[in-house]
Amino acid sequence: MSTNEIAGTANVIGSKKRLPPEVSILGVLIGIAIVFEILGWIFVGDSFLANKQRLSIIILQVSVIGIIAVGVTQVIITAGVDLSSGSVVGLAAMVAASLAQTSANPRAVYPALTDMSPIWAILAGLGVGLLAGMVNGSLIARTKIPPFIATLGMMVSARGLAKWYTLGQPVALLDDSFTWFGKSFNILGFPLPLPVIVFLLVAVIFHIALTYTRYGKFTYAIGANPQAARVSGINIGSHLVKVYAIAGLLSGLAGVMTAARAASGQPGMGVAYELDAIAAAVIGGTSLSGGVGRITGTVIGTIILGVLTSGFTFLKVGAYYQEIIKGMIIVAAVIIDQHRQNKRKKA
């Protein structure tokens, strides 16, 4: 092979290496959408992609999971896991809803605190999530117990607190100024729910934070090699508390948005949301081994989950089969991640 051919080959390889990892994930998303479009015309006689209402429902469904997944991604990058996010959503929704009730409700949780500004309900929901995240991070950093155990304990406790808070009763008759945060706005003829806008803002903020700030560098360093991170002067314990606190805060935000969308608070809100959030992160290229992951990939992974759910419903696939297929996809994503990690180690 001539020198020019070698140089050309090197340039091709270099150009391939410069492609962001999200390109392949985006290709998977496009492929899935095309498959559903074809199957739609074959079995349903209708278009899957040309329906504005269906697309609006897809992005609305994934927005809350996406907010949680942004926080979960950061946790997984540190080689941790957060199993408590779904339960924190339920608890935050209950607390926020209880402070957003109107005086017309004869069974208000706090009769003296009705008709308040929605800012207090929002701050309360965020505070619940932040506190839960700080407890998770502190347990992991100070007691050195595995993240799986610490967040599993919080998952059970938070769900129990959500049920105890009103003895299992839903919180209803919320003020319109609070439920406004779950409404949709018509932008260029396309209905765009406010939770979607919040999700995109959260994704942009933490993409910048992970890519361009010391917070991001420390997060990746801890996940890639905690011993090297410690030697380089990073306070691992303190940083882990920050990461889990942010994940909890975002779960609290998701709880507030969920309560606003449903115009009520229910103890069962957020069940299994943590699994969907982890799945979105892993499908989006975040490695369970730590040190690898990007928010942009998580956003695409979240949309993939939404497209799959909507596509199966569009094709009238039973809910049980949907769960089975979703589980197989999650396992496949983990297998691909392990294969990728093994290749990287060999290299």
Image (cartoon, rainbow, N blue to C red):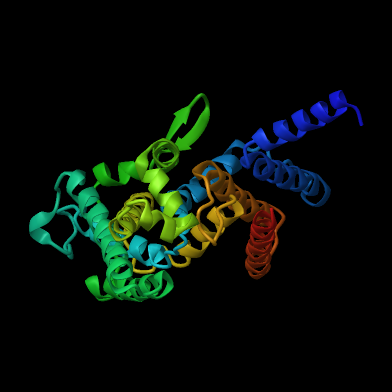
82 lies left or right of 39? left
Question: Where's residue 14, x and y in %?
Answer: 71, 33
Residue 173 seen? no
Q: Is residue 330 above or below residue 211?
A: below
Q: In this view, does 38 lie above or below 346?
A: above
Q: Quadrant of residue 96?
A: bottom left
Question: Where's residue 119, x and y in %?
Answer: 20, 44
What residue do we see at 43% from left, 56% from top?
228
Question: Where's residue 59, x and y in %?
Answer: 53, 43
Of 115 and 7, nearer the camera is 7
Question: Where's residue 292, x and y in %?
Answer: 54, 51
Of 26 and 267, nearer the camera is 26
341 lies left or right of 243? right
154 lies left or right of 228? left
Quadrant showing the N terminus? top right
What residue do we see at 29% from left, 70% from top?
139
